[in-house]
Image (cartoon, rainbow, N blue to C red):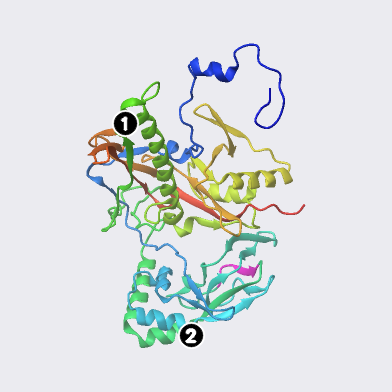
C-alpha cells in the first residue's frame, strides 16, 4: 500500500485512528489569543467610580511654576532653532502670549557646540547667559564637604540652565556644569534679555509679576505657604492665614475605546455546542479592548503617563543603561512608591547592571505572583512602554490611591447594558445580511492627583554594552 508521497506501508489490519476520529467526540480548548498580556497597570490602579463622566482634581495654589522642555527645529547640522511658542515652557515665560516677542527672543539664542569634558559654567561665577540644551548630556556638580566632586543632577535635551536667574540682581551659578558627551546648546546673553525687556512693556510686566510671585512665601513644594508658629512661650500674637486653592483645576473626562462585533445568525443559531460562539467572540474582543485601554493609559497624549508626568519628575540615566543608582534616584523623588513599570527589555538591562555590580535584586509577592523588586518595590513588566529606534525606553515609578495623593484610574459603573465594570455591550440589531452587531465600549481615564505621584527615568539604554 502506497501513501500519496510514494512511501510504501503495510496494509492496515484494524481500524485506523484517522477513520476512528469520525465517530469520536473531540475535546476542544477555548479560542486562544497571543495578544493577552499581564496588564499589571490596570490591575494595580485603584479605580474610582466617576459619576457624570468628569473627575476634577482640586489642588492647593501653586506659586512656583514647573520647568517644561523647549523644543527645536533643525535644518542641517548648523541650523538649530528654538520653536518660539515653546519658550513658554520656561518658568519665567509661562503664560506669556505675545508670539512676536517670543519669536524675537528665540532669534537671539546662539548655537554653540560643546565638547565632551568641557565645563560650561562654574559655581559661584556670575550668570551671564541662559542655556537651552538641544542635544547631548551634561552633568551638574559641585564641591562636596571634603573637597570632592559631588554630582547633583544630569541635564539633557530640552532642559534649561540659568533661566532661574531671571528677576534676580547679580545672580550666581549655584553649580558647575560639564558636558559628558559632545552636544549642542543654545545660549541667550543676559544683556539681550535686559535690552528686550526695556523695550517691550508687556514682557517687563510679565517678568516682574513672575519675580513678585517668586518672592511670596511658599513651602518646599512651591505651594502658597500657611503661616504657622511652633516652640513659642507666653502669649504672642499667632500668625493667621488660609489655604488657597487653584482657581482653574484640571478636569479629566472619561475617554473610550470602541469596536463593533459582528456575528452571523447562522453561526449563533447552529454552532453553539459545546461552546457559545457569541460568548467566545465577545470574550476575545473584550481582551483586545483591555489591551488597548492599557496602551492608552501609558501613551495617550491627554492623560497617559508618558505625556502627563511633570517635567520636574523626569530624570535621565547617568550613563545610559539603567543602573541601581538611577533606580535609587527615581525612587527617592517620591514617598510611598508602590510600583515600577518597565519594558521587559529594560528589566533585563537593569538586571545586567546589577550582575556587573554583584547585586541580587529581591522579589516581591503580589497577589500570589513573584515579581522582581528593587528596595521592596515591585517591578512590573509593561510591553506598552515604547522602545525607540535608538534602543532607549523609559521606566515609570508610581504612587497610587486617593488617600496617598497618587495616581487613580477612572471609570463609571452602572452604565446601560454593562458587561464588566466600565464596559458595556449594546445590541445594534440585525442587518439585511443576517449579521448580528454588538457595540462594545470601555469608558476610562487616569488622573495624577499631585505631580510627584509619577516619575520617569528617561533615555534608558537597553542595548547590550561590551564587557
Q: Is residue 62 left or right of residue 334?
A: left
> The residue tagged with tag 1: helix, strand or loop?
helix
Residue 271 within the segment the image draws in magenta: no
At a point 45% along the width and 64% down the height, the residue shown is: 67
> In this rendering, which labeled residue sits more in front, label 1 or label 2?
1
Residue 218 falls in image quadrant = bottom left
Position in image of residue 133 (x %, y %): 55, 71
Q: Is residue 372 above or below residue 78?
A: above
- The quadrant of the rendering that contains the N terminus is top right
Q: Is residue 406 visible?
A: no
| Residue 380 image point, x, y percent | 53, 40
The spot of residue 64 in percent (x, y) is: 39, 62
Residue at x-position 26% and y-position 58%:
247
Alpha carbon of mark 1 to alpha carbon of mark 2: how far? Answer: 79 Å
Q: Is residue 45 visible?
A: yes
The x and y percentages for residue 328 are: 59, 47
Q: Classify residue 174 by image quadrant.
A: bottom right
From the image, tell me which residue sits under label 1.
266
For disc 2, the marked residue is 191
User: For this view, does 269 lie left or right of residue 293?
Assistant: left
Closer to us: 43 or 155: 43
Looking at the rendered structure, the number of numbered marks drawn on it comes to: 2
Q: Between 74 and 110, which is closer to the camera in this rendering? A: 74
The residue depicted at 40 percent of the width and 53 percent of the height is 300
Between discs 1 and 2, the one toward the N terminus: 2
Magenta stretch contains residue 175: yes
Residue 74, placed above or below residue 426 = below
Amino acid at each position: 500500500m502506497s501513501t500519496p508521497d510514494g512511501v510504501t506501508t503495510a496494509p492496515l489490519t484494524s481500524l485506523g485512528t484517522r477513520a476512528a476520529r469520525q465517530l469520536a467526540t473531540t475535546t476542544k480548548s477555548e479560542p486562544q489569543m497571543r495578544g493577552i498580556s499581564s496588564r499589571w497597570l490596570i490591575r494595580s490602579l485603584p479605580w474610582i467610580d466617576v459619576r457624570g463622566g468628569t473627575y476634577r482634581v482640586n489642588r492647593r495654589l501653586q506659586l512656583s511654576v514647573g520647568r517644561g522642555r523647549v523644543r527645536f527645529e533643525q535644518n542641517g547640522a548648523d541650523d538649530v532653532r528654538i520653536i518660539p511658542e515653546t519658550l513658554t515652557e520656561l518658568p519665567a515665560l509661562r503664560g506669556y502670549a505675545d508670539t512676536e516677542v517670543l519669536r524675537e527672543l528665540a532669534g537671539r539664542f546662539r548655537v554653540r557646540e560643546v565638547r565632551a569634558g568641557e565645563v560650561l559654567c562654574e559655581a559661584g561665577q556670575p550668570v551671564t547667559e541662559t542655556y537651552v540644551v538641544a542635544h547631548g548630556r551634561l552633568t551638574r556638580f559641585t564641591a562636596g564637604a571634603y573637597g570632592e566632586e559631588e554630582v547633583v543632577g544630569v541635564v539633557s535635551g530640552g532642559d534649561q540652565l540659568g533661566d532661574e536667574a531671571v528677576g534676580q540682581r547679580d545672580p550666581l551659578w549655584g553649580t558647575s556644569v560639564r558636558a559628558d558627551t559632545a552636544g549642542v546648546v543654545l545660549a541667550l546673553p543676559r544683556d539681550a534679555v535686559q535690552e528686550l525687556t526695556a523695550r517691550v512693556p508687556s514682557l517687563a510686566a510679565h517678568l516682574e509679576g513672575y519675580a513678585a510671585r517668586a518672592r511670596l512665601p511658599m513651602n518646599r513644594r512651591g505651594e502658597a505657604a500657611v503661616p504657622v508658629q511652633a516652640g513659642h512661650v507666653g502669649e504672642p500674637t499667632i500668625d493667621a492665614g488660609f489655604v488657597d486653592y487653584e482657581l482653574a483645576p484640571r478636569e479629566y473626562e472619561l475617554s473610550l475605546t470602541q469596536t463593533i462585533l459582528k456575528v452571523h445568525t447562522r453561526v449563533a443559531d447552529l454552532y453553539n455546542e459545546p461552546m457559545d460562539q457569541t460568548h467566545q467572540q465577545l470574550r476575545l474582543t473584550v481582551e483586545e479592548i483591555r489591551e488597548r485601554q492599557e496602551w492608552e493609559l501609558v501613551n495617550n497624549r491627554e492623560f497617559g503617563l508618558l505625556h502627563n508626568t511633570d517635567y520636574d519628575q523626569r530624570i535621565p540615566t547617568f550613563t545610559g543603561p539603567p543602573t541601581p543608582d538611577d533606580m535609587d534616584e527615581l525612587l527617592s523623588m517620591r514617598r510611598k512608591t508602590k510600583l515600577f513599570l518597565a519594558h521587559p527589555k529594560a528589566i533585563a538591562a537593569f538586571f545586567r547592571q546589577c550582575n556587573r555590580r554583584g547585586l541580587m535584586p529581591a522579589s516581591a509577592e503580589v497577589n500570589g505572583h513573584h515579581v522582581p523588586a528593587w528596595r521592596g518595590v515591585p517591578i512590573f513588566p509593561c510591553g506598552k512602554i515604547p522602545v525607540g529606534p535608538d534602543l532607549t525606553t523609559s521606566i515609570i515609578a508610581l504612587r497610587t490611591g486617593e488617600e496617598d495623593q497618587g495616581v487613580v484610574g477612572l471609570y463609571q459603573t452602572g452604565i446601560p447594558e454593562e458587561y464588566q465594570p466600565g464596559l458595556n455591550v449594546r445590541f445594534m440589531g440585525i442587518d439585511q445580511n443576517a449579521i448580528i452587531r454588538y457595540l462594545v465600549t470601555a469608558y476610562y481615564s487616569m488622573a495624577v492627583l499631585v505631580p510627584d505621584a509619577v516619575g520617569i527615568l528617561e533615555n534608558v539604554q537597553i542595548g547590550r554594552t561590551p564587557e
